[in-house]
Image: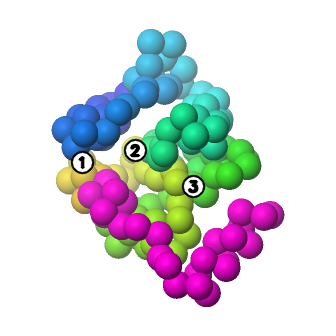
Amino acid sequence: MAGELPEAIDRWLNAHGHDVTRFGVLSPSGSEAWPEVGRAVATCVASGEAQFGVLCCWTGTGVSIAANKIAGIRAALCADAATAAGAREWNDANVLCLSLRATSVPVAEEMLGAWFLTPPTADPTYRAMIDQVRRS
């Protein structure tokens, strides 16, 4: 079930100049298995093939768990723009996870805008914590 949200995210990313590789139900293979999709997107980001990933499943939790199993991934389940900005700033998150059930298209667009406009902090305290997460 692709639904309105994944298509809207795809349109927003394309409209804002991002190269999009489709996975899951939006791809030609059409897999709906969220563990496979989470791993595939995370592997693409971890390998450097993509700078960021955006994942969706019914709650967003499953894809965030699956993505975070891949070394180098810091997937964040977000519900609003402030949380998405914080995930980028304080956690240097590289995969944004959203709930298909709970996220409206306007809120998703606000989150995407915040995600891509917010750089990771240069604060040494937070950088040390991010590095600690990277090592674990």
Rendered residue at 43%/28% (across/down): 21
- SS for dot 2: loop
Residue 93, position as x, y percentages in the image: 53, 60
- Could you tell which of marks 2 and 1 lies nearer the N-terminus? 2
Q: CA distance from mark 3 to mark 1?
A: 20 Å
Residue 87, position as x, y percentages in the image: 48, 68
Segment tinted magenta in the rendering: 112-136
Q: Amino acid at mark 3?
A: Ala
Residue 88 belongs to the span the image colors magenta: no
Residue under numbered circle 1: 105
Is residue 76 or residue 135 the one in the foreground? 135
Residue 123 in view here = yes
Please tell me whether mark 3 or mark 1 is closer to you in this view.
3
- SS for dot 3: strand
Residue 47, position as x, y percentages in the image: 63, 38
Quadrant in which the N terminus is drawn: top left
Q: Amino acid at mark 1?
A: Val
Q: Amino acid at mark 2?
A: Leu
